[in-house]
Image (spheres, rainbow, N blue to C red):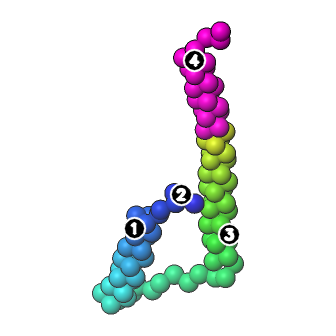
């Protein structure tokens, strides 16, 4: 997961897929000796495994980053509360 909203990324990838399909069609009609490469099942599975591992690595790194940011946010919240308490005690009336 890159970001919660990956619309721009998916639109770019869709444009690349459509563009490659168009180029593939042009190559078969315009180039007389063009033939698309054949891909085997083992190569296809290895490619999918590569994509899955890259996605897992990216998701793990993002999850670790979120944990660090949550810890920082909790520390900042505690500090803010402590400063607010300190300010309240300084502004309060002295005990009689």
The CA span between labels 2 and 4 is: 48 Å
Going from N to C along the chain, the mark reached first, 2 or 4, is 2
Q: Is residue 83 visible?
A: no
Q: Do the CB atoms of the residues marked 2 and 4 lie less than 8 Å apart?
A: no
Q: Is residue 62 above or below residue 51?
A: above
Percent coordinates x, y for residue 71 in the rendering:
67, 39
The picture quadrant where one finds residue 58 is bottom right
In the image, the segment drawn in magenta is: 73-96
Of tags 1 and 2, the one toward the viewer is 2
Percent coordinates x, y for residue 63 in the rendering:
65, 51
What label does residue 49 carry, if any? Answer: 3
Report helix, strand or loop for mark 1.
helix
Q: Is residue 15 visible?
A: yes
Percent coordinates x, y for residue 18 in the rendering:
38, 79
Going from N to C along the chain, the mark reached first, 2 or 3, is 2
What label does residue 2 carry, if any? Answer: 2
The CA span between labels 2 and 3 is: 19 Å
Of tags 2 and 3, the one toward the viewer is 2
| Magenta stretch contains residue 78 | yes
The CA span between labels 1 and 2 is: 14 Å
Give the residue at x 33% y 90%: 29
| Location of the C terminus (image quadrant) | top right
Of tags 3 and 1, the one toward the viewer is 1
Going from N to C along the chain, the mark reached first, 1 or 4, is 1
Report helix, strand or loop for mark 4.
loop
Circle 2: is it few (<14), some (14-19), or many (20+) Cα within 10 Å?
A: few
């Amino acid at each position: 997961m890159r970001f919660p909203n990956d619309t721009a990324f998916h639109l770019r990838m869709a444009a690349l897929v459509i563009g490659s399909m168009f180029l593939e069609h042009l190559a078969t009609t315009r180039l007389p000796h063009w033939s698309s490469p054949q891909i085997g099942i083992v190569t296809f599975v290895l490619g999918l495994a590569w994509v899955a591992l890259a996605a897992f690595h990216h998701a793990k790194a993002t999850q670790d980053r979120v944990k660090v940011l949550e810890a920082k946010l909790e520390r900042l919240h505690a500090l803010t509360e402590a400063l607010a308490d300190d300010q309240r005690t300084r502004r309060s009336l002295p005990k009689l």
